[in-house]
Image (cartoon, helix red, strand yellow):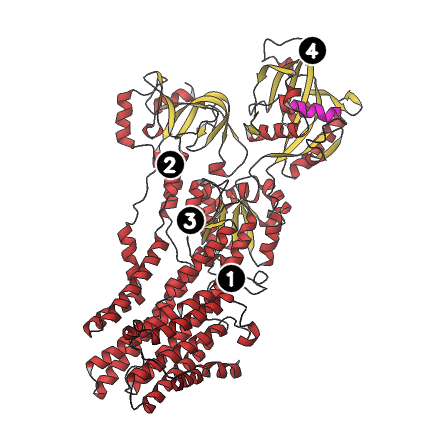
């Protein structure tokens, strides 16, 4: 019994296919042949999740207290701020998970099947296990199946394996293991019949979809730090508020006054504008990166790039062009680069080279249509080389194909019978060099025909090995003239006593810009790692060509990974730069192993379905925009619109700039908030009326401070930003003395504010309106001056340049104009409860506002 018949009986079908009734039953049993989506969060649940943040909860409590105290305007203002922040967060998080939908697009929408003995064209989603499918060149395989009939079938499986060379498939009648076809792969040549063995989520594609769905979202380093800062501020705030409230009650202060003090202090402690400014800053970074052809799908990914220290890159289509190309030819006993000839240098100097390219074009099933070559990647590369050498359609039209002996893995060669315009008949052969040489008794060279002796064969095989060592796929070419037109193409005499012509070596070449990008990665302290499904030698050759630092000990294959447990793999990856012959599961494990080291922030680049799980698992996934599948794009954090590896370097630079600038405006905002806390706390401790009411604090935090903070987010970068090592992902955002500067400056700003407030209370015999306005104004002016100090951690304000950031100058002037409106505008003044200031008040404000700058100029 043939293996095909066994498979048919095993799955309870026949050569006539399933009956419609049985197909309907199996559809109910197995379900539709489509990939299911995991349940998505609703729009409402995403929006409501924005209110779970600890800082937001405190603000909502402050809103209720303000309503309770009759401070309606304060309460409304706080609610508006909370809703604005929630909307910004909602927009950031509201991204649909389309990976599975993209996988559906890769599945053939229609398929030709056999049911009840008849061919039918049905929707691919209605295919069931047991269906017989008719497949032809160009068809996308609609489900996992076994090939039971067919010959000359080759399938492009790069979408699953990453290998750029098409794989030969043999029917199960051949009693071998190469009869499996997978959903989403494409037939490049041949025609056959296959029996469906798995559909939907039970397919290999389905298992990848499951892996994508099982990979959860992980917070970025910035998100973790900001969340930690927020909680710390809230805890400190609640502690201080509680102490001051209880202290006031103990002193006999009214419940109303102490509740107002506590609420004001709570509002002062929370940087309400911080989440919005971070989001806007990242969004501005996204716009800048888009101009550089990097599309950011997830905002925090911008910052994550800044601390990336490992880039795991798929070879095919990412580091290379994903296009097989003939790079070397061997003729006339010379190994030559393909670049030695082009369209403008028609191959005239060598009869042998012309014959080689002619055989390559005629013994070929690829087609040249509308400036594009269609067919098997290897044959397309050979045809492209022939066209490049001047073998055009006009020349080829002189030959007519009479017959073909197709390639198979046993023969390891392909032959065609052609007749030229003079009636001469030729057999043209291409195949594995050793096989071709065994069929040859003569060779063509610059001196004409000569005997193919043992020494000549050894020399040619040595060249073949030299080319193979360069990761080239090598084919030999031969021919002979026939005295007759063969009637029986299976006759062994047709391919005997051939004339050897030469060799062609081809490979998937590196992208031109990759070499420079790799250099920049090393300079920036980033380690590039190649992950590929291709052969080990191919991976090594490409790695050397693009300038990766490696030796043979740093190569690991998928088979070797299978013998390593997770802990062993974690140790191994620290010294491995190239991974070869890996599957999607291997890629996933490799990324996981790198991430086990807490110091590693891992980026993964890729373009195929096989990369999607690893893209999701990586700290940041980077997909190719042109050659990448929708699955890779939707599973990624960033998409390279130009498929240019160099764009990654630009993105990393942008990420570092953004992180530096986040430190700048964080320094500014937190010092300003600390100044408010100090002023409020001192007043409460000494039993004075609050110097600032909640709505004034909100105005300062959002309206006045917001513009300078945004301007700091686009501050020009330091010159050494891409020549320093990536920062430690566990590095505190307050490292390198930033925390100390915030404490010192915040205390000085707060001290200046409360001193000016107390002085005015004394001079005006307790005029609380004027005193609060002076405190309000002093605090704002001091903060605007401090904005210029926040530009640099290493230089003082006078050294870094007052006008280096024109946006900051404009922001400070705008904030000052808003301050004047808040004090003197008849509409705003009653809302903010401010009063017009006189000249003497402004002199006091100016004197105390400059105190922080004067002291820090002496300290640093």
Describe residue 316's horizontal placement relative to residue 284 as left or right.
Answer: right
Q: Position of residue 612 (x, y in %)?
A: 43, 44
Q: Quarter-wise, where is residue 283 in the image?
A: bottom left
Magenta extent: 341-359
Q: Quarter-wise, where is residue 100 in the image?
A: top left
N-term mark: 3 or 1:
3
N-term mark: 2 or 1:
2
Cα–Cα gap, marks 4 and 3? 62 Å
Q: Position of residue 131 (x, y in %)?
A: 35, 24
Q: Estimate how packed mark 3 is, as few (under 14), some (14 to 19) or many (20 or more) residues with alpha carbons within 10 Å.
A: many
Mark 1 highlights which residue?
657
Q: Estimate how packed mark 1 is, as few (under 14), some (14 to 19) or many (20 or more) residues with alpha carbons within 10 Å.
A: many
Mark 2 highlights which residue?
104
N-term mark: 2 or 3:
2
Q: Is residue 197 above or below residue 600?
A: above
Q: Disc number at residue 814? A: none
Q: Residue at x 37, y 63 (%)?
A: 275
Q: Is residue 479 above or below residue 619?
A: above
Mark 4 falls on what kind of element? loop
Mark 3 highlights which residue?
616
Q: Residue at x 55, y 73 (%)?
A: 794
Cα–Cα gap, marks 2 and 4? 53 Å
Mark 2 falls on what kind of element? helix
């Amino acid at each position: 019994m043939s293996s095909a018949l066994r498979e048919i009986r095993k799955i309870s079908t026949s050569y006539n296919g399933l009956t419609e009734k049985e197909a309907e039953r199996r559809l109910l049993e197995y379900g539709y042949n489509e990939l299911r989506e995991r349940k998505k969060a609703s729009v409402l649940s995403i929006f409501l999740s924005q209110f779970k943040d600890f800082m937001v909860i405190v603000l909502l409590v402050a809103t209720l207290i303000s309503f309770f105290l009759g401070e309606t305007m304060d309460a409304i203002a706080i609610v508006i701020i909370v809703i604005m922040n929630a909307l910004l967060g909602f927009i950031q998080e509201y991204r649909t998970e389309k990976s599975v939908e993209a996988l559906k697009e890769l599945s053939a929408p229609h398929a030709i099947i056999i049911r009840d003995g008849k061919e039918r064209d049905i929707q691919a989603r209605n295919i069931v296990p047991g269906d017989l499918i008719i497949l032809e060149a160009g068809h996308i395989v609609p489900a996992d199946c076994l090939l039971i009939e067919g010959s000359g079938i080759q399938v492009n499986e790069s979408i699953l394996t990453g290998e750029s060379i098409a794989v030969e498939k043999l029917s199960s009648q051949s009693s071998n293991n190469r009869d499996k076809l997978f959903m989403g792969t494409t037939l490049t040549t041949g025609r056959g019949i296959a029996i469906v063995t798995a559909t939907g989520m039970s397919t290999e594609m389905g298992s990848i979809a499951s892996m994508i769905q099982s990979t959860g979202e992980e917070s970025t380093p910035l998100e973790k730090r900001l969340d930690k800062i927020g909680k710390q501020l809230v805890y400190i705030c609640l502690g201080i508020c509680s102490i001051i409230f209880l202290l006031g009650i103990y002193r006999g202060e009214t419940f109303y006054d102490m509740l107002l003090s506590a609420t004001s202090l709570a509002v002062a402690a929370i940087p309400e504008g911080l989440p919005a400014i971070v989001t806007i800053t990242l969004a501005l970074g996204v716009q800048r990166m888009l101009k550089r052809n990097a599309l950011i799908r997830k905002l925090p990914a911008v910052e994550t790039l800044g601390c990336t220290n490992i880039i795991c890159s798929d070879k095919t289509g990412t580091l290379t062009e994903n296009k097989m190309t003939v790079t070397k030819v061997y003729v006339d006993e010379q190994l030559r680069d393909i670049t030695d000839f082009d369209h403008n240098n028609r191959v005239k100097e060598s009869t042998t080279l012309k014959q080689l390219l002619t055989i390559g074009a005629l013994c070929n099933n690829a087609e040249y249509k509308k400036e594009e070559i269609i067919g098997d990647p290897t044959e397309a590369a050979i045809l492209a080389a022939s066209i490049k050498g001047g073998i055009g359609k006009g020349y080829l039209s002189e030959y007519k194909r009479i017959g073909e002996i197709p390639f198979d893995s046993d023969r390891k060669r392909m032959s065609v019978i052609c007749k030229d315009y003079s009636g001469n008949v030729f057999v043209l052969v291409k195949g594995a060099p050793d096989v071709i040489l065994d069929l040859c008794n003569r060779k063509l060279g610059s001196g004409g025909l000569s005997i193919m002796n043992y020494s000549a064969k050894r020399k040619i095989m040595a060249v073949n090995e030299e080319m193979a060592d360069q990761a080239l796929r090598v084919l030999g070419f031969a021919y002979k003239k026939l005295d007759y037109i063969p009637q029986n193409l299976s006759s062994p005499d047709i391919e005997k006593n051939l004339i050897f012509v030469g060799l062609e070596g081809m490979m998937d070449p590196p992208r031109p810009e990759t070499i420079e990008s790799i250099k920049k990665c090393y300079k920036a302290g980033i380690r590039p790692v190649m992950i590929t499904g291709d052969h080990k030698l191919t991976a090594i050759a490409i790695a050397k060509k693009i300038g990766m630092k490696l030796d043979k000990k740093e190569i690991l294959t998928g088979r070797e990974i299978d013998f390593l447990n997770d802990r062993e793999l974690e140790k191994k990856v620290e010294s491995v730069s190239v991974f070869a012959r890996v599957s999607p599961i291997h890629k996933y494990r490799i990324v996981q192993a790198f991430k086990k080291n807490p110091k590693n922030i891992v980026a993964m680049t890729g373009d195929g379905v096989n990369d999607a799980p690893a893209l999701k698992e990586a700290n940041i996934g980077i997909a190719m925009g042109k050659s990448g599948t929708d699955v890779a794009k939707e599973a990624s954090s960033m998409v390279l619109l130009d498929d240019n590896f160099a764009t990654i370097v630009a993105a990393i630079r942008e990420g570092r700039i953004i992180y530096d600038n986040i430190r700048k405006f964080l320094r500014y905002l937190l010092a300003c908030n600390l100044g408010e806390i100090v002023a409020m706390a001192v007043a409460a401790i000494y039993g004075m009326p609050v110097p600032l009411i909640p709505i004034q604090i909100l105005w300062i935090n959002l309206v006045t401070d917001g513009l300078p903070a945004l301007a700091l987010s686009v501050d020009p970068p330091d010159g050494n930003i891409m020549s320093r090592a990536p920062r430690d992902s566990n590095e505190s955002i307050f490292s390198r003395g930033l925390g100390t500067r915030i404490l010192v400056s915040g205390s000085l700003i707060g001290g200046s504010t409360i001193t000016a407030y107390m002085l005015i209370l004394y001079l005006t015999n307790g005029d609380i309106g004027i005193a609060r306005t002076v405190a309000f104004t002093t605090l704002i002016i001091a903060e605007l001056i401090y904005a210029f100090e926040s530009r640099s951690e290493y230089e003082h304000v006078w050294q870094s340049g007052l006008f280096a950031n024109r946006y900051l100058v404009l922001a400070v002037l705008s904030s000052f104009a808003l301050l004047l409106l808040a004090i003197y505008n008849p509409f705003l003044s009653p809302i903010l409860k401010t009063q017009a200031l006189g000249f003497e008040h402004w002199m006091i404000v100016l004197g105390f506002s400059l105190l922080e700058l004067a002291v820090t100029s002496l300290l640093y």
